[in-house]
Amino acid sequence: MSNEEGYVTADGRKIGGTLMEMKNITLRFGGVKAITDISFDIKEGEIRAIIGPNGAGKSSMLNVISGFYVPQEGEVWFKGAKRPQMRPYQVAQQGIARTFQNIALFEGMSVLDNVMTGRLNYMKSNILHQAMWKGKAEKEEVENREAVEKIIDFLEIQSIRKTPVARLPYGLKKRVELARALAAEPMLLLLDEPMAGMNVEEKEDMSRFILDVNDEFGTTIALIEHDMGVVMDLSDRVVVMDYGKKIGDGTPDEVRSNQDVIDAYLGVSHD
Amino acid sequence: MAQSSQTAGGLKSIPALLHRNATEFGDRPAYREKEFGIWQSWTWKQAEKEITNLALGLINLGVNEGDFIAIIGRNRPYMYWSMVAAESVGAVPVPIYQDSAAEEMVYVLDHCGARFVIAEDQEQVDKVIEIQDRLHQFEHMIYLDPRGMRKYDHSRLHEFSHIQEQGHAAREEFLPELKRRSDKLDYDSTCVMLYTSGTTGKPKGVVLSNRNVIESAKNSSEFDHLRLDEEILAYLPMAWVGDFIFSVGQAYWCGFCVNCPESEETLQADLREIGPTYYFAPPRVFEIELTSVMIRMEDASPLKRRMFHYFMDHAKKVGGDILDGKPVGFGDRFKYWLGDLFVYGPLKNTLGFSRVRVGYTAGEAIGPEIFDFYRSLGINLKQLYGQTEATVFITAQPDGEVRSDTVGVPSPGVEIKIGESGEVYYRSPGVFEYYYKNPESTASTKDTEGWVATGDAGFIEPDTGHLRIIDRAKDVGKMADGSLFAPKYVENKLKFYPNILEAVVFGNGRDQCMAFVNIDLNAVGNWAERNNISYSSYQELAGHPEVLNAIKLHVEEVNKSVAVDEMLSGCQVHRFLVLHKELDADDGELTRTRKVRRRIIEEKFNDLIDALYSGKDEIFTKTEVTYEDGRKGSISATLKLIDAEVVPVTTRKVAAE
């Protein structure tokens, strides 16, 4: 179904060519098939959602994209080349950043330091330079701090800059995690349930930030989300998974009217 | 009105002052703003350049002399530049409260007929777009923060920096025109138009000339010996006259630096980092800070807590006297010095008041305990009394003559008289020109000799010459037995208790006074937490029997203190209730500057007042509330009506006759 060309969204944004393509991915844990023969693509500049009921394999899919899991079958193509098996940090170097379903921040560190860790790929000076705090290391720190401050400003978390993450409420932690992912200036941003456990107001804020990130930085975003309302409003195209299989793929409207999707969500007995 | 323009050295407009500052001390900081975690600063020279570019850009956009330019946003250097740039092209800047809902903006924008709007961000732009169909003269909008604005139709929208760039590019073409326009500005030309918050009726546009602003700034700066090296933090609404005088008038006159906080939430941290030398805050801010200090001290370790109380007791005894330069014994001075080392100094540092030389509070009465607390720490906190119509200053307290119950002596250049009804009148070079498009109100406020009615009732203390304000003149009434009814006087006494956020007293023309009370969620909530009282909402806490009991004790104490005053002993509160919702500006119960709108509350809660007078024990009520985004809902509750003990007084009217 996916053509190589981009398309224009309903609100007039131009979406580019294919950035990432999953070809016939199958992932097994022992005898359990988490993902069965799934293919889809992510285009440059779009907001792509992966949805599905609990246990559908969404997070596994995201872990395949982020390089944390290596599928037994199938290929992952990124920027027009087949991606070899690589370590997660190598994937990060390629320009993919993510947030986690269960927040994974350094709880004892301040928000600022947490976000700074997202800049790891941009810190090239060696340990000696860093220890002496001269020349290159200092310059690098200043540059990275500037980039981080822009993100702090963007996500409106100035007032908690120096606060240890452990003291923050859940909604803000999620935002800090997004900040850290953004600090890596990713080409592709993976969000694992960015709205889980949030109240309506926090969800609205987060949605606004996701749209703004896409709009301002042109970042391609792939997200997993439970809240159907949010997904349908935010995303340009949606992949629907159920029991490790792809049961739908298309614009929110197409997906909404797909009988398989309705069945999966309303519950139909599986043979 | 004996002011002479010579004393201002021929500097007869804000742009002229800007030019002087940029020439005479161009390398000193004029503006700072914390952005991206760093204090970014602009010197006077840079500020002049930015303002010139913007002014040129405005001419390029088609701004004519006499046009009105609405400015909506929080305190940021760019917003201040917008005001000055507007004036320098001969237009009139109209700052607007940035938290107004779109509906509230319609009136003001339509009334002044603003052709241009300079808005801070998407939020403000959206509000104006929402109402633009109803604004017939509106043409172009300039926005500062481009975030989220990419997809907007840009035929009438312009980015701030682009306007400046275009202005800079068209420099050759428009510079002579800009110079022509700003050279024309003199003492009589309009400097700014500010809308009053409107405790009664529609807001009125107060037109202030350069004479008003510059003379007031000059007089008040001299009164407090303000200098070039002051630091102030600009955080109060730009649409309020006080901010205009402090952050534009006095800042340009003296040439000191205006610091803008990073965001509303970071205010406290920013205050600490800047350490202002000249500081203004409404009583509420001081109250909130004192409450939070007290709460935090309760949580501190026993040693710290004991030290705090020990030294604060000492400060209460001698701190004020030391500040006023009165004689204090060596032992006490030494102990105060120790206290400063261990308690006062660190506390002032935490609050951001380490360097405050002159601090002012105004707008409402401040509780004596609160006032004395700050003064005893060695912070020179004073009171002033002012109005938009007076370009702020009517009276102020000179150093060494500071008390919590007066508002000071007439400011330099101000004359004061008390009318027959007890209303305070003043005349000064700061007296406003006129209300825009409202000659009737102008005439009824300002008489032909230039005397302006303040609307406040008060008297001048014979021995000190200090002015004391009793209440709003129109709120002062008579009880059924003819004794004086001054609700504000009693309300203020009630509000001095940390547990009470707001109080409204009724009783005009009746035989007894009744009161509505709003609890302070912070203070009472903390108390509840400490005493293991659980509550799920404001409403539930407000109705808790223990809370009601505490409030009852407060009311009874107030009654005792009111009874002492011969004139006002009739105003004791016989019955009261604790409201189930906080009075809120969004519901129209308070003004945007958080003053009680008595008539509206009286109308809205009519049923409750009737119940209080009818002697019932409780009443069921339902109230409509407006959420911040304009949606409406309602809350209902059963309120307890409580009797408070009053002190019997024999009517003393005999003495008056």
Image: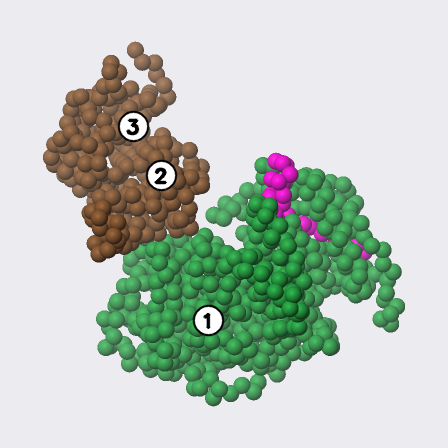
Q: Specify the segment rendered in magenta.
A: B510-534
Residue A59, which numbered label?
3
Residue B231 or A97: which is nearer the viewer?
B231
Residue B351, x across and y down, in percent: 52, 57
Distance between mark 1 and mark 2 Cα atoms: 41 Å
Name the quadrant containing residue B157.
Answer: bottom left
Asked if the magenta segment contains residue B122, the reply would be no
Residue type, mark 2 in image? Phe
Residue shown at the point (32%, 52%) measured from the top left: A149
Residue type, mark 1 in image? Glu
**B102 vs B14: above or below:** above
**B496 vs B654: above or below:** above
Which secondary structure, mark 2?
Answer: loop
Horizontally, is B180 left or right of A68 in the view? right
Would you name the residue on which mark 2 appears?
A: A106
Residue shown at the point (51%, 62%) measured from the top left: B353
